[in-house]
Amino acid sequence: MSAIPNIIPPRHPWLDRLAAEPERALDALLRGVAHLPGLQRASPGEALMALLGDLPPEAAEWGLLDRALLVWLQARRQAVDGLLGRPGGVERFIRETGEAFRAAWRLKLPESCAWIRAEAFDLLRWADGFSLDATFDLGRAVLTAAAHVQQGGEYRFLWLRICEEAAAPRLRHRLDAALLGLARTPGAQAGAPSHDLIVGLARWGARLPSDDNAKSEMVREWRALKAAFPRQPGFWRGQWEAVLADERIGAHPFTHWLREADPALQAPSKTGQVRRTPQLPKDISGSIKEMDRECRAQGLTAPLWQKMAALLSQVEDYADATGESYYLVTSCTNIAKIILNQAPGQALTLTRRALLWTPSDGHAWSTRATALDRLGRPDLAEAVLWEAIRRVPSNIALYNDLALAWVERGGLAEAEALLRKAAALDPNDGPTFVELARVLWLLGRADDALALLRDFLRRTNDAIALYTFGCLLVAEGRSAAAEVLEQYRRAYGNDHWAATLQRLIAAGTAGQEESRQHLREPRRRGGLTQGVPWDAESAERALAAEQAGFPRLEKIERVAQADLLFRLGDARRADALRLVDTALTDPADAYAQVVKGLAAPEYRVEMIGRTGRFAGSLPVRLALTPDNAGAEHWHDLLRRFPEGGHLTRLVQLARGAVGEESDTVHAALAAWCSEPTHWANGWDKHLKETLRRHLDGDDIPVSLATLAHDALTQAVDVGQDAVPLAA
Amino acid sequence: MHPSHHALSRLLDDMLVSGDVVLRARAENFRFEERVSQGRQAHYETQHGPVGATYEDWLESHQDYLQGLVYTEQPETFLSVNTDAALPAAVTSELGEGQYLIRVESLDYALGETKVGSLADLENILAIYNNQRRDQNVSAGEAKASLQEICRSLNHNPFAIRPRFAAFAQELMEDIDASDWPLRLRDRLGLAHLPPTNSCGPHPVVLMRYTVGEVAAHARKLVANHPLAVPTVLDAEPYEIFHPSPQEQNYGRTLNLAGAGDCDRLASEVLHLRMDYTPSHIWKVGAITARADTSPERLAKLRGDHLACLQLLSDRDDFGML
């Protein structure tokens, strides 16, 4: 850029302060208390541009500012409480800190930008607490900074996730940041709009309500995008074609709104103008079943793997074109399951790929943990399971897998608690009850174990449960074992299990001991396996990626364990407190705040007036709501977090809303339960179904308090979504 | 305005005899101020007086005051405590509400936060929106949607919550109509803090235009005591490119960076509450391409001439005399 023909300003006195005391000088400037002749009423960002903008690139002040800004930002992240007590409170904190983030990218300060780039996901999680409204949203400042400092596609899934979240009116303003991020993603054809802009817009649109206001918003956003990237109608038609043709996406009215508002999207594409629309393979499910059969018969051969890879590539192309990841996610997880024993490295990679698109797919989480187990990393597998349970508390397989790990290390009380949760979720799940009975027996509560299975078998026919019931009777030397054997034979014939049971009964004391030994044996989920040779490289890559993310998961794991221990009662309370307080050495840890808040009423009292750093986090605000909160408190939360109204009301109901308030809460929750659920949100579906039954007065094993508890821990943003998982 | 706060009073005394033009100017503004009510001043001094005797202490305490009571959803600038600075009722009368206010906003934030990546693009979009240009790939409706995005950025800026300085369009028509309007308005409105730089280039700005009536309607929604106020030293940071106006003046008067010139042409300035912009408020976009001369010598002369004009216009030889 040519030099501005202008008055050469004398050196500004603030630059001398910067040279002498960089950190203090910058701090004063960002807090609005530096002496800035000529610039006193400029925003800090504008002031910095004016102060340094005419210095040559090699001037020492650039480096001084960069390092001072980095130190300042890092310090801000750590020390918050004292700053929130100043006049101006949270708003002032957001304004000052947001300006610092802006200064980093606006002045292209390399060290600060590199730090923001490296920490973006954690910074966003932290900044989310400081999100009051469209004006005061530190998260938006972080997102805008990320949009400017990104170097490639590292935030692609972050932008897409933010597009989805922006469908909530409270976060509507973040759509601009997300689309900016997608528009600025390096790597796209120079000057051309990235196709991901369409995908992002579609993801946002697909989550909007179906009212007129949403329609106006959608049309307006689409028009703004067109104005920012002027192109001929055919170009846009080509961009939208696959999205609008998708059955799942097309079910949402936003596709009609767009067609109605824009004639360019009404006509079919002409040859030459079409963006090549990827086609979905025919009968994906049938193809995968066939692959499963082939794998069982011939093993995972190279040609079979090629067939699998080709199918995955095709469904991924489709997901890229439409943003609809259902086929990709289900294909990845189903194929991962098929190849788990022979190519656990590839299986792990596939589950990570699925989770990148759909971060709360319980099946993918479970398979990911199993793949880690197969690769000889039960520690990583367990950490994955803890986060999976937090994220999808309705997935029974996850509880069972984790319980097995606890049994193995002797944590029987923990295992029992996990299995009881699973049992409450599905009172007819055989594996859960079998394992729970075994755990009870291991705990020395044989009668409880027998009663549990007896009760289970009264309502469910399950061969393994009946067999286990027989084994337990043998182990306890009870004569009723013979009757159970007969019952088994009548129901399932004289199979291998019947023969075993007969042998144990016939062997007398030796059989009793063998049965006891059998019940004590660890039930691993498979453990280390020897995969096909060509899997080694992907295994290594995927494990390295897992290892890199392990510290984050480990932190979550500790808090999740504390949550479980709190539920075990007073005996384990001290252990739970130790774990959660360790996590709270990072006071920004929202998950730890929620867990402690839910478990310790005295902590809720202690935190009164100290939740400023979580002003934008509904789960924390709800978990820390004191028991004596009045109607005004609930109304304030409903007003501030309209998108989380169901959470607020659920907690209110669990805390015992009464009278007229209770009727209002019931009605609002009933309305929420009838809203449609996205296929990828298994927890949401479960919550709606279970809550509906509660509202209908059904007698169900999951209490309202448990439901509210799980809903809150589930809703915490632990900063894992959209973290690049693909190995 | 003569503070009774001991440390502040002494500090101002020291600053008034300083050889530093800027410090002197900032202290003068405080002493020249005639519109801050006793109640407002008392609260400022008792609750937000500097804890120490240094200039830095004052900057700290003044900023705390602004953050707590002025840079808020309902600044005390527009509450009954500041009635002394309210504009005459005639301005917000039915007749007065039709008057157009203008305000220059920096576009640097908006261009960095939206998909509209450049001033040239924005200029094109604005021309399409105003039906001054046709583009086969962008309709007026699409241009409007794009301008709405720009407005969102301006409206959601955390600094947008500050009381807004604005001027009357009618007084500045000659400058607004000129091709170099950004420079002219920069001078007339005292916007030295938006300079172009070698690193960042010309400073993009947008000229907003809206009626007093719109401002008043918004103020009514927020149950403000008055919608418009004459700027005082308590409404923003201490600043040498600001000069309080005598009580006899119905408005504030901007310090013209191009020189006071004809005293009758001093622009009137007012403060109003934050108000959301819409595309129809966007009048022009442009760029400030040169720095203003705010050297100490120049500043001293500008302020001296400005003061003389205020004395003349108000027929107050005593105004600004210490």
Image: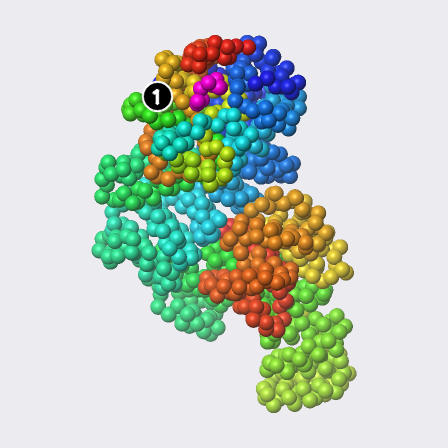
Q: Amino acid at mark 1?
A: Arg
State the image coordinates of residue A642 (x, y, percent, origin top left).
Answer: 51, 53
Callout 1: chain: B
SS at mark 1 in the image: helix
**Residue placed most toward the observer, A576 or A296:** A576
Q: Mark 1 — residue?
A: B184
Q: Residue at x 47, y 41 (%)?
A: B221
Say if A405 sits above or below B165 in the image: below
Percent across and percent down for residue B121 are 31, 36
Could you tell me how many numbered marks the image carries?
1
Image spot of residue B280 (x, y percent)? 33, 38
Residue A597 to residue A585: above or below: below
Residue A331 is situated, as x and y percent measured from the top left of the image, at: 44, 64
Residue A560 visible, this angle: yes
- Residue situated in front as seen by the camera: A147 or A543: A147
Magenta residue check for A170: no
- Which residue is at a point 59% across and 29% down the rendered structure image? B64
Kindly identify the residue that appears in the image at 68 percent across and 66 percent down.
A417
The residue drawn where x is 59% and y is 82% is A461
Residue stretch in magenta: B243-252
